[in-house]
């Protein structure tokens, strides 16, 4: 199929893009890389009267360190994150996740802001950003506002973005160099959306016990799910197989998966259990030896 007729607009600045949004509101759609939106338009699941292409707004393409935080502009492409030395040094978890995003052709066009705004609960970036306790910077006619992930993602493909607003950047704390991290997902084929995915960040104290745990699951509910009760349970405990199994044993209480053609509810819960254990163990194994704190 082909998309319904629309008027194509291509602003060169954030101000121009916001003016278009103010003028056309809910009749307009933002397109950046187009990897998510173009299929939706082709299937006529969305029929905007105006398509606002923001890909020329160079001021939204950057990766930078801002104190103890990494900031990534909304128009930064997936491959730029994947190849970034800064990200490799300060957030290897994100590098690991980016390698699972579609195929190289997708990563060469898809953007960070597009993935976040599309809000697919099986996408890698929303899950990772949730585990990192990241934030989304939004810009609109009233200026900028910063929203944590648990407030930004509302349900399937729905966020707190207003029709007159843009995603400007994502921000997340640098992963402590003494910590280990891991991203694991299960797909039917490489490049497919995940059936379930898990992001984990782990710190150990001088005794080798959990001092910090950050866990998020994607694909098991309408939004990424932060497993904060399981995190709290693990703090101060020895990272043995028994302890991890006990912690993950209650995971079903926090999930809200749906069954579909690719997976039943029961299978998604099973995957979440297995992958969370595996992600935790992998992250533990990646904690630098002799650098526990």
Image (cartoon, rainbow, N blue to C red):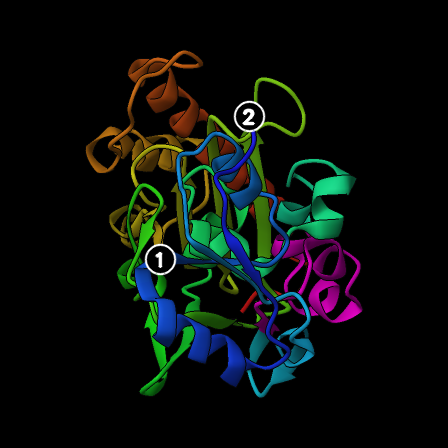
**Which residue in the protein does label 1 denote?**
27
Range of residues picked out in magenta: 72-95
Q: Residues within 10 Å of mark 1 (few under 14, many from 20)?
A: some
Res 1 label: 2
In the displayed orientation, state which residue is furthest to the left: 253
Q: Residue at x 52, y 37 (%)?
A: 3
Q: Is residue 160 left or right of residue 199?
A: left
Percent position of residue 54, x then y: 59, 67
Q: Residue 263 is drawn in which quadrant?
A: top left
Percent position of residue 278, x then y: 52, 33
Q: Is residue 235 visible?
A: yes
Q: Residues within 10 Å of mark 2 (few under 14, many from 20)?
A: few
113 is higher (above) or lower (below) than 219: below
Disc 1 is placed on an element classified as: helix
Percent position of residue 58, x then y: 69, 77
Residue 186 included in the magenta stretch of the image: no
Q: Residue at x 31, y 17 (%)?
A: 259
71 is higher (above) or lower (below) than 119: below
């Amino acid at each position: 199929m082909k998309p319904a007729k629309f008027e194509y607009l291509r602003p060169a600045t954030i101000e121009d893009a916001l003016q278009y949004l103010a003028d056309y509101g809910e009749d307009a759609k933002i397109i950046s890389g187009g990897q998510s939106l173009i299929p939706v338009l082709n299937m006529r699941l969305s029929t905007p009267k105006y398509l606002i292409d923001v890909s020329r707004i160079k001021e939204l393409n950057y990766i930078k360190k801002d104190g103890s935080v990494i900031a990534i502009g909304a128009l930064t492409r997936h491959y730029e994150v994947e190849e970034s030395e800064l990200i490799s040094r300060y957030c290897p978890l994100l590098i690991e996740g980016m390698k699972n995003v579609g195929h190289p052709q997708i990563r060469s066009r898809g953007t960070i802001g597009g993935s976040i705004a599309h809000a697919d609960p099986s996408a890698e970036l929303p899950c990772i950003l949730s585990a990192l306790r990241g934030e989304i910077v939004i810009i609109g006619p009233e200026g900028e506002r910063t929203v944590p992930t648990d407030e930004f993602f509302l349900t399937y493909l729905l966020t707190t973005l207003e029709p007159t607003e843009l995603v400007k950047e994502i921000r997340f704390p640098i992963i402590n160099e003494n910590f280990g991290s891991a991203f694991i997902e299960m797909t039917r084929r490489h490049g497919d959306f995940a059936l379930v995915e898990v992001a984990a960040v782990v710190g150990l104290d001088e005794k080798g016990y959990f001092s910090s745990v950050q866990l998020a699951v994607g694909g098991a509910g309408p939004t990424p799910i932060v497993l904060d009760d399981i995190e709290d349970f693990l703090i101060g405990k020895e990272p043995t197989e028994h302890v991890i199994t006990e912690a993950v044993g209650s995971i079903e209480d926090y999930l809200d998966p749906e069954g579909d053609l690719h997976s039943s509810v029961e299978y998604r819960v099973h995957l979440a259990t297995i992958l969370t254990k595996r992600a935790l163990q992998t992250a533990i194994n990646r904690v630098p030896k002799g650098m526990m704190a």
